[in-house]
Amino acid sequence: MPQRTIVITGASDGIGAAAARNLAQAGERIVVVGRSPEKTAAVGSELGVDYFVCDFAELAQVRDLASALRERYPRIDVLVNNAGGIMRGHELTADGHEKTFQINHLAPFLLTTELLDILTASRATVINTSSAANGFGRLDLTDLNSERSYSTNRAYGTAKLANILFTAELQNRYGKDVGIAVAAFHPGVVATNFAAESTSWFRYAYKTVLNRFLLSAEQGADTLVWLATSTPGRDWLPGAFYVKRALAKAHKQAYDVGLARDFWDRSLELVSADEPAAPSELDNA
C-alpha cells in the first residue's frame, strides 16, 4: 500500500501525539499540528515529520494553516480534527465567538471546509474527536455564544455535540456522491492534561487518586487509529459516532437531520463573517 498523508491536529500531546507515533511507526506520512511551539516541534522532531503551529483561538491562524497544508500536500488521505479543550469560563475570542465553541467546533469546521477540494479529490477520511460529554450539551442556534446561559461543562458538551452534528452533515453532503468518509469518536477518559486549566469538575479526576483508573494516551488513541487504518463502509459506518470501536448512542439532537443542516449553514456564516474582505480596486488606488 502506498504511503498515505495523515494530518492530525492537537498532536503535540495526549491522544493526538500517541496516534501520530502509532501511525508513523506503521509507515504513514504524518503531519503534526499543535498549539504549543515547543511541544509541537518536539513531537515533529521525534518522529522526523512535518509540523505546524496553530492556535485555534484565532481563525486567521486556521486559515493560514489551511493555506500552508494546501501548498505542501496536494493529497490528504486522512484529516484528524483532534484539537480541543475545555475553558476556564465564558470568554470570547478575538473573532467574537465563545472560546469553547470556536476551538472545538468552528476552527476544525473552518479547516475542513478550507481543504474540501483536496479532501474530496483524495476521497479522504475525516475523523472528529468528540466526547461522551456530548450528553451534557444542548445546541441552540440562537445562542451559540452561550450568552443567555453558560456553564463550563455544558459549553464543552455542546461543542462535542457540535462535532457529531458536523460529522453527520459532512458525510451527508460529501459522502455518498463525493467519497469522503467521516466519523466522530469518544476516546474515553484519558490521563492527560485535559481540563487542567478549566473550572470544570472534570479536572479533579486528573489530579486525584482517580487518575490511576484513567486510560493511557495510547489506549485513548486506539479508536482514532482504528478509524484511520480500517475501511469505511466495511469496518465502520460513515457519519456515525463511535466508542471503543463500536457504534455508540449520542445526544438525541445528534440525530436531528434538519438541525445538522441548519447548523452547518450557520457555522459557514460565522466563519465567513470573520474572513477578511478581499482588497478592492479602491484599496490600491
Image (cartoon, helix red, strand yellow):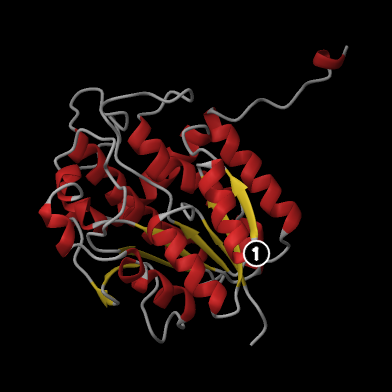
| Corner quadrant of residue 188 | bottom left
Residue that appears at 20% across and 43% down:
203
Residue that appears at 60% across and 30% down:
275
Residue that appears at 34% across and 36% down:
100
Residue 128, above or below 107: below
Q: Is residue 153 left or right of residue 84?
A: left
> Nearest the camera: 57 or 265?
57
Q: Position of residue 116 (x, y in %)?
A: 60, 56
Residue that appears at 50% across and 66% down:
20
Residue at label 1? 48
Quadrant for the N terminus in the image: bottom right
Kindly state the secondary structure of the residue where label 1 is placed: loop
Q: Position of residue 171 (x, y in %)?
A: 44, 64
Q: Is residue 65 left or right of residue 261?
A: right
Residue 29, above or below 202: below
Q: Is residue 136 left or right of residue 10?
A: left
Residue 166, above or below 23: above
Most extreme residue toward the right is 285
- The answer to whether any part of residue 274 appears in the image is yes
Residue 114, above or below 19: above
| Corner quadrant of residue 121 | bottom right
- The answer to whether any part of residue 137 appears in the image is no
